[in-house]
Image (cartoon, rainbow, N blue to C red):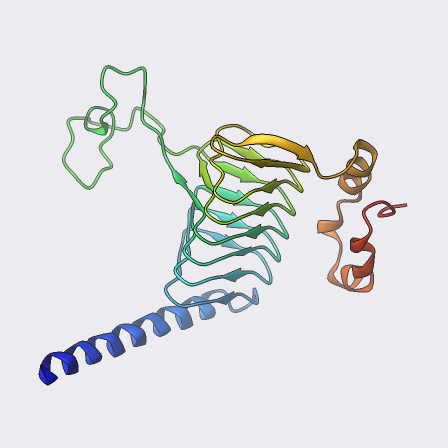
Amino acid sequence: MGFGLSKIAKYISFRMLLLQLDRQLLYFKFRNRNLKLSISCDIRNSNIGKNNFLGENVSLINSTIGDYSYINTNSKVSNTIIGKFCSIGPNVQIVLGTHPSKFVSSHPIFYANNKPFKTFSDGVYFKEYADVVIGNDVWIAEGVLIPGGITIGDGAIIMARAVITKNVEPYSIVGGIPAKHIKYRFDVETIKRISQSKWWDWEEKKLRENYKKFHDSEHFGL
């Protein structure tokens, strides 16, 4: 029993060492971006902004994440363009592909040759993963599912556990399964003022000097 526990402890210690090494390699790769990340993150073929944070066990594949945006623990993101100042909660899934519904069969054995298993196809005849586009200042709460091809407008809020099936308008709040429009965050004029300000493109100095103005939506931009 003691020998078994000793082997397990050594394995865990070795695995933790590898995870820490992977993290240090990512830090070195993105050393000029001020990236903060936890262990067991997977970043492949992706562009990182400035001052981002990735929580534990986050994957970011074939994607772009804008300045100051963060992704929390256990979220999986692929084929996605994320704007600036976005808050993505834990357990969010933006990895959902699709299969053809108008082919005779929906099985990839007939339309793709890029699978880990043998197929009959000599090429790829169906695009399974359409890009997701997420605007600036979007909050996506815990456990949200977003399939390919969806666009989420600036300033939108997606409530926890929502399943998104269609595009989300800027500054709207949606929730449910499937997600439905609940309300807009502000009135039409306020949305217009905030959108036209494009504050997410301001320099850091200006943002820092004016941070209290972000507490008052009624007078922002006046």
170 horizontally vs 16: left or right: right
Q: Is residue 22 visible?
A: yes
- Vertical position of residue 52 compared to residue 178: above or below: below
Residue at horizontal 24 percent and vertical 29 percent from the top: 112
Q: From what the image shows, is residue 102 above or below residue 152?
A: above
Image point (38%, 37%), residue name: 96
Can residue 169 be seen by looking at this rendering? no
**Quadrant where the image shows the N terminus:** bottom left
Q: Is residue 127 above or below residue 39?
A: above
Tell me if residue 145 comes above or below residue 74 in the rendering.
above
Residue 16 located left or right of residue 109: right
The image shows residue 145 at horizontal and vertical percentages of 44, 40
**Measuring 76% from the left and 38% from the top, which residue is drawn there?**
186
In front here: 120 or 139? 139
Quadrant of the drawing holding the C terminus: top right
- Front residue of 162/27: it is 162
Q: Name the quadrant containing residue 50.
A: bottom right
Q: How many marks?
A: 0
**Image x and y of residue 54, in percent:** 49, 60
Extreme-right residue of the structure: 222
Examine the image and state in which quarter residue 41 appears: bottom left
Describe residue 133's horizontal placement relative to residue 17 as left or right.
right
Residue at 41 percent across and 73 percent down: it is 24
| Residue 137 screen position, x and y as percent | 65, 47
Q: Which residue is at the front of the view, 93 or 197? A: 93
Residue 3 location (% of width, % of height):
9, 83
